[in-house]
Each structure stands twice: as C-alpha cells, then as structure tokens.
Amino acid sequence: MWGGGYGVFGGLMMLVFWGVIIALIVLAVHWLRDNSGTGGKSSDALETLRQRLAKGEIDEEEFRRRKAALEE
C-alpha cells in the first residue's frame, strides 16, 4: 500500500523526487529566459546611458558615441 513495504518513507521519497524534478525544470526555464539573447542587456545599458545623460555625467556627444557602439 505504501510503495512495496517502505511505509511512509517511500511516500516521502516520492514527494522529494518529484519536488526536485519540478525545481530543476523551473530553474532551467529561468536560466534559458535570462540567456535567451542580449536584447535585455542592451536595453539596460541604453537606459543607464540615458540616466547618465540626464544627470549630466556625460554630454550628448558622448551619449551618441556610446549608443552607436551599443547598437552595433
């Protein structure tokens, strides 16, 4: 009735097994989504450039030069 004579231990091990499988699937999907391309990273860099321009840390010429380098 409980996994061929293993009692409650067999049932708990089955739950642990499936929990690990589900966790691995979730981690794999998360990893694949983060590494699916550089689109997100490029837009983050562009946003950082925009913030630096707004704060006055870089001028417009520097902003255009760095933006062009990011878009290559």
Image (cartoon, rainbow, N blue to C red):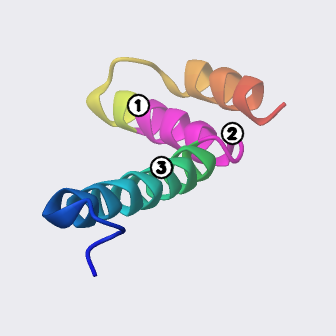
Mark 2: amino acid: Thr
| Residue beneath disc 3 | 24
Assign the magenta stretch its main secondary structure.
helix
- 6 to 2, vertically: above or below: above
Q: Is residue 18 shown in magenta?
A: no
Q: Is residue 45 shown in magenta?
A: yes
Q: Residue at x 75, y 23 (%)?
A: 69
Of marks 2 and 1, which one's residue comes earlier in the chain? 2
Indicate which label's residue lies in the foreground, 3 or 2: 3
Magenta segment, which residues?
35-50
In the picture, measured across the screen, residue 43 lies left or right of residue 1, that is: right
Mark 1: amino acid: Leu
Q: Position of residue 11 (x, y in %)?
A: 25, 67
In the picture, measured across the screen, residue 62 lies left or right of residue 57, that is: right
Mark 3: amino acid: Leu
| Residue beneath disc 2 | 38
Q: Residue at x 33, y 36 (%)?
A: 54
Of marks 1 and 3, which one's residue comes earlier in the chain? 3
Indicate which label's residue lies in the foreground, 1 or 3: 3
- 72 to 14, vertically: above or below: above
Residue 17 location, quadrant: bottom left
Q: Nearer the viewer, residue 19 or 39?
A: 19
Query: Disc 2, disc 1: CB below 8 Å?
Result: no
Q: Residue at x 34, y 62 (%)?
A: 14
